[in-house]
């Protein structure tokens, strides 16, 4: 028979992330807005190193934090087992729907529990991490053990099966949806696109002044790139662009902000030093998520130089959305979702991932600050009208309710 309709849903989310967790979409939609609408959201996560365990509050939701990995051999497997065990207990008694984000192991549990308990399962797919591991291994940029590569291949195959069997799939972009339908064999009617969004609150002028003061950049133009500093992003491209732009704008300062992977921050600093711009090309570690908008607002423009690579063509341009949300214009490459966003909003300039073209695009905004500011304002208006987290919560809530009301127990 059909499950009875409930005004409120009991949602179990398994994000395959340690807690505390800084993730804009998870926090804004699942931890804050869904509970504010009367839904009961519960999570199971492993603890981050040194973090407490137990039942904790996250916004309006509850997180069951189990002991996480210690870095020792097999501790990661043990942590996964603890997550699986705790999640299975919750599914039996306190879940109308299970949402798994980017985890094959947790998806297998969800599929088993759907068969046993009739609880529907939604898979949220944001980035092909297994493909990333294999790509870096083939390029020789990261040493990847053979067993890791085998596990990645098995994971890709298993994920394709999971995607076909999930009650619904949340894809990060239109391009990902099209690929899942075209080559993945996923029923289009079960896919809903849930891109990353933006809050829309602008930092106060004091916060912006504080950021520029800390960076040592007062009146000079500031170009910001923010996000993960990873090998596959080829951020050395920005050093070359900065060197080219310096010919006409020697006072322009560049800031790369974000967590570094595999020593990329050191490699960027060495390259900037070799180019003679180390005093104008700063590489800084990640800051708390709530502090990022002040850095974006402090920038004259941001750059989203995403390589034209299959790994990124399916991506949602998170940093572009966050930039436009505070009216900072963007120079970005033509990744499908990013190109559509910049073109439709008028919030920036689209340029190929080519040195001369990208440098010219950056210069065009530096040469005309008035036009650049106008682009940022148009971008903000568009993002708030189409990508606010309130709108994305509407989409998520509607899809969760549809799979619950259509499930069989």
Image: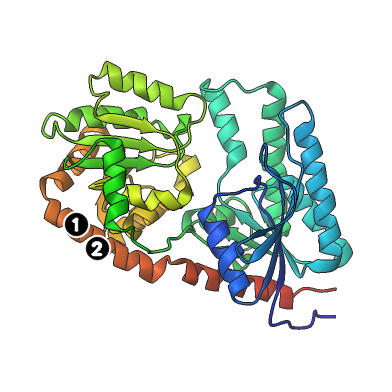
Q: Is residue 383 visible?
A: yes
x then y, percent, for residue 351: 26, 44
Where residue 373 is drawn, which disc sits there? 1
Q: Secondary structure at mark 1?
A: helix
Looking at the image, which residue is at 38% across and 55% down?
322
Q: Nearer the viewer, residue 330 or 211?
A: 211
Residue located 59% across and 20% down the image: 143
Report how far apart the C-alphas of labels 1 and 2 lie in the structure: 6 Å
Q: Quadrant of residue 401?
A: bottom right
Task: Name the residue beneath numbered marker 2.
Answer: 377
- Most foreground residue, 381 or 234: 381
Is the residue marked by circle 2 packed among few (<14), some (14-19), or many (20+) residues within 10 Å?
many
- Tell me residue 363's x, y (percent): 16, 41
Does residue 360 lie above or below 365 as drawn?
above
Which part of the image, by quadrant, shows the C terminus? Answer: bottom right
Task: Describe the element under mark 2 as helix, strand or loop.
Answer: helix
The residue most toward the top is: 274
Residue 29 in the image, given as x and y percentages of width and height: 56, 64
| Category of crowding for the residue at label 1, using alpha-carbon neighbours closer than 10 angstroms: few (below 14), some (14–19), many (at least 20) | some
């Amino acid at each position: 028979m059909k499950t009875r309709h409930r005004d409120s849903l009991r949602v179990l989310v398994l994000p395959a992330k340690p807690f505390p967790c800084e993730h804009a979409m998870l926090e804004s939609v699942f931890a804050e807005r869904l509970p504010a609408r009367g839904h009961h959201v519960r999570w199971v996560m492993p603890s981050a190193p040194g973090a407490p365990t137990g039942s904790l509050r996250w916004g309006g939701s509850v997180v069951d934090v189990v002991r996480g990995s210690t870095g020792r051999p097999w501790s990661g497997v043990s942590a996964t087992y603890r997550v699986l065990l705790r999640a299975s207990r919750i599914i039996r008694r306190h879940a109308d729907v299970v949402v798994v984000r980017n985890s094959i192991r947790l998806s297998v549990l969800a599929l088993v529990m759907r068969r046993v308990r009739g609880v529907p399962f939604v898979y949220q797919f944001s980035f092909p991490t297994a493909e990333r591991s294999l790509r870096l291994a083939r390029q020789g940029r990261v040493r990847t053990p053979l067993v890791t590569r085998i596990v990645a291949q098995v994971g890709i195959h298993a994920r394709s099966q999971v995607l076909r069997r999930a009650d619904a799939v949340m894809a990060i972009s239109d391009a990902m949806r099209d690929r899942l339908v075209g080559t993945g064999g996923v029923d289009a009617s079960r896919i809903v696109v849930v891109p990353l969004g933006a809050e829309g609150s602008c930092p106060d002028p004091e916060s912006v002044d504080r950021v520029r003061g800390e960076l040592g950049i007062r009146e000079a133009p500031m170009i910001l790139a923010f996000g993960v500093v990873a090998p596959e992003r080829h951020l050395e491209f920005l050093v070359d662009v900065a060197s080219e732009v310096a010919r006409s704008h020697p006072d322009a300062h560049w800031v790369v902000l974000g967590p570094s992977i595999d020593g990329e921050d050191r490699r960027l600093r060495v390259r900037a030093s070799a180019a003679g711009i180390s005093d104008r090309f700063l590489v800084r570690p990640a800051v708390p998520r709530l502090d990022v908008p002040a850095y974006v607002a402090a920038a004259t423009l941001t750059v989203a130089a995403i390589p034209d690579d299959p790994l990124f063509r399916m991506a949602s341009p998170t940093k572009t959305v966050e930039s436009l949300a505070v009216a900072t214009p963007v120079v970005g490459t033509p990744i499908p979702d990013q190109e559509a966003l910049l073109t439709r909003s008028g919030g920036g300039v689209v340029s190929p991932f080519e040195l001369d073209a990208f440098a010219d695009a950056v210069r065009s905004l530096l040469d005309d600050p008035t036009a650049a500011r106008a682009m940022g304002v148009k971008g903000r208006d568009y993002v708030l009208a189409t990508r606010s987290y309130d709108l994305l919560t509407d989409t998520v809530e509607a899809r969760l309710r549809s799979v619950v009301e259509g499930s069989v127990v």
